[in-house]
Amino acid sequence: MKKIIFGFLIIGYLYPCIITFSSKELKGKVGEIKTIVVEVKNIHTPCLLPIEESNFEFENVKLVSESKWDTIKPNLFKKIITIQLLKEGKGSLKVKRSCPIQTSSAKLDIVIEKRDFKELKNEVKNLIKKIILGEEISFNYLLITLEEFINTYEKKKIKNEKELYSIAKEIYSYLLKIKAICEKEKE
């Protein structure tokens, strides 16, 4: 009997926390906002690593908001993450827990699709409106969106929207100068 109990204790220490996402994969278009639920189930009770020390890494997505960790059960926790998809291609959300007993991690792959020109045009107009109104926007998202709009406009040789194109190109040029100044000051 002691051997069986000892065996269960050893096996319990071999397994890390279980980290899951509300969906197995995520897909969307550039600029879209997505909400994901992250759950962590502690295998070792009590876990030596507080739930707040879970680390999040974002690739090609921007964190918009996050809830505090909710305790569902004594060893089960939930957090709601809201992200914005930044650039066409692949993105990811990674969660890592570096517990002294065992490190655990999970990764959610995200497929980010290109917007069509109409969606892109409307987003550029929306961002310019936000600039004029003094609303908060992400510098990197603005830069990415303007670059995408300019490149799409030039590649597709679009005849209309010349005024919006020239405004976007001018704003983009200023943003690149501001970015260069900021990076120079960091050095």
Image: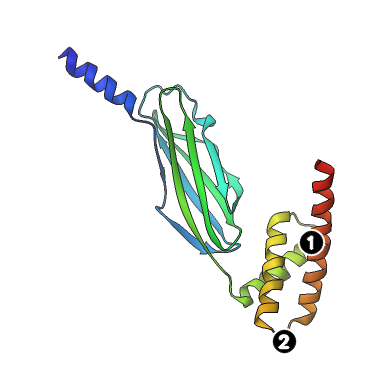
Q: Residue furthest bottom?
A: 159
Above or below 163: residue 125? above
Residue 22 visible, this angle: yes
Front-most of 132 and 13? 13
Secondary structure at numbered mark 2 = loop
Q: Residue furthest left?
A: 1
1 and 2 marks in contact (CB < 8 Å): no
Q: Quadrant of the N terminus?
A: top left
Numbered badge on residue 21:
none
In the rendered structure, which amino acid carries the disc numbered 2? Lys
Front-most of 114 and 135? 114
Residue at 40%, 21% in the rendered image: 46
Residue 103's x, y, as percent?
43, 30
Q: Quadrant of residue 9?
A: top left
Residue 137 visible, this angle: no
Q: Quadrant of residue 159?
A: bottom right
Numbered badge on residue 159:
2
Numbered badge on residue 131:
1
Q: Quadrant of residue 157?
A: bottom right
Secondary structure at numbered mark 1 = helix
Residue at 73%, 71% in the rendered image: 125
In the rendered structure, which amino acid carries the disc numbered 1? Ile
Residue at 54%, 40% in the rendered image: 56
Crowd around label 1: few <14 · some 14–19 · many ≥20 (10 Å): few
Q: Quadrant of the C terminus?
A: top right
Residue 95's x, y, as percent?
49, 40
Q: CA distance from mark 1 to mark 2?
A: 26 Å
